Image: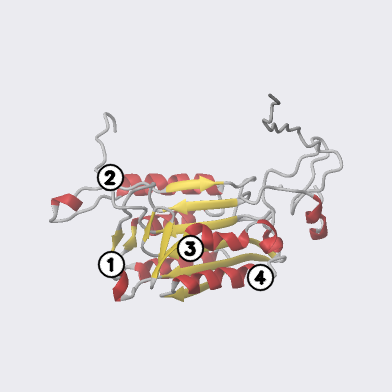
């Protein structure tokens, strides 16, 4: 009987003659710079989707405190020289429309893109005011050739939302960037469609995400505080690791309902970035 198994081989792509995306070339190694180019004329857009009030049919409660998060984010990213656009109480179709419209803009003079979603959620799900939508339906518009002017540039998605209802009770411890390459060269090199994305989730998969009605969510409070202090000093993964530590160590829930009392939280970073990201050029 003939062997019908299909096999796929692979080989390394040699650096010689390869065009580089939005970066610089190393005379010694022939590899692109290890740091994203962040000295375009504009830092980029920061889109904030702030969902506070939901249709009664969804049975979703009002997200009190989210406006504090949105204001904190606006100030933080404006200080980083981003153009900030906030939209409140957006339907599922409205969120998709926002993403599609932004993806069709010309980002060629922008260094990066940031999207912050403040809403209710479940694992892989974000809620609009009228129901739920999968996160991949929102990020879809920035992948592959759908948004070529952001190809090879960092795209950050910051998600403040629950990822299910599990509660973290915690555990006691025993001890205390040579020459820039023209944009037209981009078409000559192939990169994975998932490359150059970073997802910063407020909580680990399967867990509840905590929000204070007066001060905002633990995650956004911490993210903005760390960005204010370290955005011009540290690389993005160092920044987000410090955010993880701040949320994990400095916050704990207080409730008269013992089910929700003394609970903890840790954010979750999923990075497909291919270079180091600094907010300073």
Q: Mark 1 or mark 2, which is nearer to you?
A: 2
Q: Earlier in the sequence, mark 2 or mark 3?
A: 3
Residue of label 1: 214
Q: CA distance from mark 4 to mark 3?
A: 18 Å
Q: CA distance from mark 4 to mark 1?
A: 37 Å
Residue extending farthest to the right is: 17
Residue of label 3: 116
Q: Residue at x 49, y 70 (%)?
A: 95
State the mark number for residue 16.
none
Residue extending farthest to the top is: 1
Q: CA distance from mark 3 to mark 1?
A: 20 Å
Q: Earlier in the sequence, mark 4 or mark 1?
A: 4
Q: CA distance from mark 2 to mark 3?
A: 24 Å
Residue of label 4: 104
Task: Give the x, y percent position of residue 172.
Answer: 24, 35
Q: Residue at x 52, y 57 (%)?
A: 136
Locate the N terminus and report the quarter of the image it occupies. Answer: top right
Task: Give the x, y percent position of residue 97.
Answer: 55, 73
Q: Mark 4 or mark 1, which is nearer to you?
A: 4
Confirm or deny contact between disc 4 and disc 3 (CB under 8 A): no
Task: Give the x, y percent position of residue 186.
Answer: 78, 55
Q: Is residue 225 above or below residue 57?
A: above
Q: CA distance from mark 2 to mark 4?
A: 40 Å
């Amino acid at each position: 009987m003939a062997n019908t198994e299909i096999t796929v081989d692979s080989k390394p792509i040699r650096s010689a003659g390869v065009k580089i995306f939005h970066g610089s070339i190393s005379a010694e190694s022939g590899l692109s710079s290890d740091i994203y180019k962040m000295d375009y004329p504009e830092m980029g857009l920061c889109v904030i989707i702030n969902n506070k009030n939901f249709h009664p049919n969804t049975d979703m409660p009002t997200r009190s405190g989210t406006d504090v998060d949105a204001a904190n984010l606006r100030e933080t990213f404006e200080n980083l020289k981003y153009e900030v656009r906030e939209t409140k109480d957006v339907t599922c179709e409205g969120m998709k429309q926002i993403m599609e419209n932004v993806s069709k803009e010309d980002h060629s003079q922008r260094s990066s893109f940031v999207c912050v979603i403040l809403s209710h959620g479940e694992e892989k799900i974000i809620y609009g005011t009228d129901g739920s939508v999968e996160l991949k339906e929102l990020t879809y518009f920035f992948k592959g050739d759908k948004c070529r002017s952001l190809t090879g540039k960092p795209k950050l998605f910051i998600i403040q939302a629950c990822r299910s209802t599990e509660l973290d009770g915690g555990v006691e411890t025993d001890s205390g960037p040579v020459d820039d390459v023209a944009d037209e060269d981009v078409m000559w090199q192939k990169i994975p469609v998932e490359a150059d994305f970073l997802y910063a989730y407020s909580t680990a998969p399967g867990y509840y995400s905590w929000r204070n009605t007066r001060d905002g969510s633990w995650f956004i409070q911490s993210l903005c505080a760390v960005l204010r202090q370290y955005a011009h000093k540290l690389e993005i993964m160092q920044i987000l690791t410090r955010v993880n530590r701040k949320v994990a160590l400095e916050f704990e829930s207080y409730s008269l309902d013992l089910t929700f009392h003394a609970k903890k939280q840790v954010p979750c970073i999923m990075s497909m970035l291919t270079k180091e990201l600094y907010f300073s050029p």
